Amino acid sequence: MVKGHNLDEAERSELEAMGVEFMGHPYEDPVVLYDPYDGPITDSQLTEIVEQVHRQSQLGELPPYWRNETSGQLQPAIEALINHGSQPDKFPPPTPQQLGLVIQYFQLYINAPCWQGDSNLVELRAQAQQLQTVEDCDRWLMACLDLGIDPL
């Protein structure tokens, strides 16, 4: 990404033609994202956010993400859960071993220190300890989504 304050008029015009918006001064950072809660996010702000996320992930404050797991076992297990949930007539449910991995992942995810919340979060954490079936996982995932938490 190009910082807005380093742009000449031609570069700015080219970015505007691609749909990039600028706030305030013509050489201010371009708006690269729009958050419905916080409003426009500039290139510099996005860089700060990415750096903060990187620092937090290095400190273990962020939840794990199943696609980053390196053993090669969790990703097929999650995909089996997703595929079965979307087309149960076409895809079999996860094996008991796969389901066990999925449940362990959900428990790690929901207990990450980054999640701050009220009694609903406490309840989700307790429910994660009780997961046993695909149906339990489906209900738990829906409850997570209701709070804006998406483990998948």
Image (tube, rainbow, N blue to C red):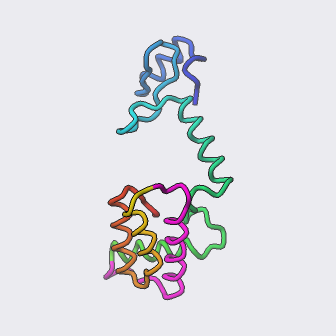
| Relative vertical location of residue 90 with respect to residue 110 in this rendering, above or below | below
Q: Residue at x 56, y 12 (%)?
A: 8
Instruction: Please tell me which residue lies in front, 39 or 93.
Output: 39
The magenta segment: 88-116
Q: Quadrant of the N terminus?
A: top right
Residue 146, magenta (yes or no): no
Instruction: Please tell me which residue lies in front, 83 or 66.
Output: 66
Q: Residue at x 49, y 77 (%)?
A: 103
Q: Residue at x 42, y 24 (%)?
A: 21
Q: x%, y% of residue 88?
A: 33, 80
Tag count: 0
Q: x%, y% of residue 84?
A: 38, 77
| Relative vertical location of residue 149 with respect to residue 89 in this rendering, above or below | above
Find residue 87 and report its image quarter: bottom left
Q: x%, y% of residue 33?
A: 44, 35
Q: x%, y% of residue 144?
A: 38, 64
Residue that extends furthest to the right in the rendered view of this protein: 58
Residue that extends furthest to the bottom in the rendered view of this protein: 96
| Relative vertical location of residue 37 with respect to residue 112 in this rendering, above or below | above
User: Is 28 on the left-hand or right-hand side of 52?
Assistant: left
User: Is 54 on the left-hand or right-hand side of 23?
Assistant: right
Q: Residue at x 37, y 72 (%)?
A: 140
Residue 109, magenta (yes or no): yes
Residue that extends furthest to the front in the rendered view of this protein: 119
User: Is 43 on the left-hand or right-hand side of 24?
Assistant: right
